[in-house]
Amino acid sequence: MSIANYQICTKTVMWILTDPDIVFDNDGISNHWYTYQKSKRAFT
């Protein structure tokens, strides 16, 4: 993977090198952010 392919979530500190299964939307937000938001709503 070249440095041009690196991406960091705009909401978290997650990036492609720390999690090869991470997915980003068009706004640069990772799937982990959305998972966290869903979990947070379940407990509040």
Image (cartoon, rainbow, N blue to C red):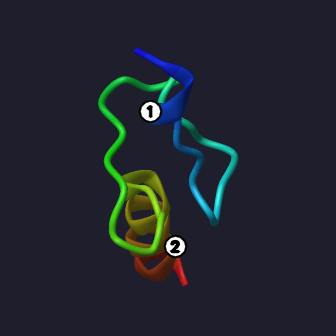
* Marks 2 and 1 close (CB-CB < 8 Å): no
At mark 1, the secondary structure is helix
Measured from the top left, where is residue 19 in percent x and y?
44, 26
Q: Nearer the viewer, residue 26 or 4?
A: 4
Between 31 and 35, the one lying in front of the other is 31
Which residue does the numbered mark 2 point to in the structure image? Answer: 40
Q: Decide: is 34 above or below 41.
A: above
Instruction: Residue 44: name its quadrant.
Output: bottom right
The residue sitting at 44% across, 52% down in the picture is 32
Q: Which residue position holds label 1?
A: 5
Question: x, y percentage for residue 4?
Answer: 51, 33
Please provide percent x and percent y for residue 5.
44, 33
**Residue 19 vertical position relative to residue 7 in the rendered view, above or below:** above
Which residue is at a point 40% across and 77% down the rendered structure image? 42
Name the quadrant containing residue 1: top left
Circle 2 residues within 10 Å: few <14, some 14–19, many ≥20: few
